Image (cartoon, rainbow, N blue to C red):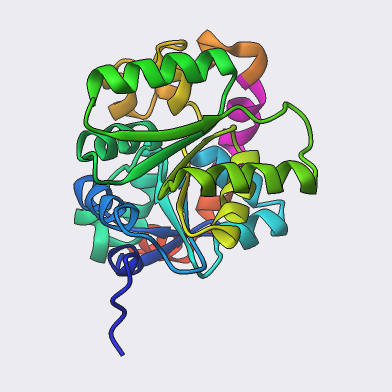
């Protein structure tokens, strides 16, 4: 039977492995359109989990089977957030190389909001400080006044209890939101996205620093650095204390995991 649900387009993207993770191979515009379609409809009892994975995500997952399990969940979609991941994927899987693009969380959020209307998707913002959320909502309303932001919540900065999670779920349900943008940092946000998709009929997306970038509280790397795969150097220079481990530990771990990819090994062993 043909799958006709609102997540049909997401389910239709081919999946390919890099390290321990299965990535949905997609062109950027196709990914955005699929998300708008999914987020414009009220889902059934189970939601959709959308993750944006980069080199650091692969590094973390390589030593954490629980993290791998939520990212590779049958109902989850993992897009390529980092340029180095895209490079590895294109080389390892030439059959899908033409369509394998970077599907970067902050750009996806911008693209979805640009295509949103008052009728949907209906957006909920989860994460960040109250000040960041206020600034983010102000910027979103200025740039895309037709987009419906129906609620926001800054959760406590600690381990959330079952009562906390129940309160978050109820707050989202009360707004009638169909898309929940989660900005809590990697890997925490991926576990939250997985839980939300299991609990609520929403599209839940973990978009990392998108809240800070779109609110204007943090600077993004210049476009040429993003395109060249050197964005990590810009972010490390701007936030060395917070991000040193992500890049100085994570980058070698990513390279080691990517080198084990069967498709990449076949390519490099060819004469």
Q: Nearer the viewer, residue 2 or 229?
A: 2
Q: Nearer the viewer, residue 190 or 123?
A: 123
Residue at x-position 78% and y-position 30%: 158
Q: Is residue 233 above or below residue 150?
A: above
Q: Is residue 227 above or below residue 136?
A: below
Residue 213: x and y, percent? 41, 19
Residue at x-position 49% and y-position 67%: 75
Q: Nearer the viewer, residue 114 or 9?
A: 114
Residue at x-position 51% and y-position 40%: 55
The C terminus: image quadrant: bottom left
Residue at x-position 54% and y-position 12%: 131
User: What segment carries the magenta color?
Assistant: 243-254
Give the left or right position of residue 221, taking residue 233 as reference: left
Residue 79: x and y, percent? 40, 50
Residue 195: x and y, percent? 63, 54
Q: Is residue 133 above or below residue 115?
A: above
Residue 41 sits inside the magenta stretch: no
């Amino acid at each position: 039977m043909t799958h006709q649900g609102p997540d049909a387009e997401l389910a239709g993207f081919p999946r390919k492995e890099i390290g321990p993770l299965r990535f949905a191979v997609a062109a950027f515009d196709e990914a955005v359109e699929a998300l708008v379609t999914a987020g414009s409809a009220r889902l059934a009892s189970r939601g959709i989990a959308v993750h944006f994975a980069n080199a650091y995500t692969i590094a973390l997952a390589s030593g954490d089977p629980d993290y791998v399990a939520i990212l590779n969940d049958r109902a989850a979609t993992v897009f390529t957030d980092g340029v180095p991941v895209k490079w590895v994927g294109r080389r390892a899987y030439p059959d899908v190389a033409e369509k394998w693009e970077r599907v970067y969380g902050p750009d996806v959020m911008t693209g979805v909001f640009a295509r949103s209307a008052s009728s949907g998707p209906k957006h909920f913002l989860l994460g960040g400080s109250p000040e960041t959320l206020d600034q983010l909502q102000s910027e979103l309303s200025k740039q895309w006044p037709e987009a419906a932001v129906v609620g926001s919540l800054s959760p406590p900065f600690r381990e959330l209890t079952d009562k906390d999670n129940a309160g978050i779920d109820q707050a989202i349900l009360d707004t009638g939101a169909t898309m929940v943008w989660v900005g809590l940092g990697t890997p925490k946000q991926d576990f939250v996205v997985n839980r939300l998709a299991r609990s609520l009929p929403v599209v839940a997306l973990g978009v990392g620093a998108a809240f800070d970038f779109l609110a204007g509280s943090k600077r993004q790397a210049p476009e040429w650095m993003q395109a060249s795969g050197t964005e990590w150097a810009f972010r490390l220079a701007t936030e060395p204390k917070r991000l040193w481990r992500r890049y100085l530990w994570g980058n070698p771990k990513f390279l080691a995991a990517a080198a084990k990819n069967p498709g990449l090994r076949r390519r490099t062993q060819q004469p």
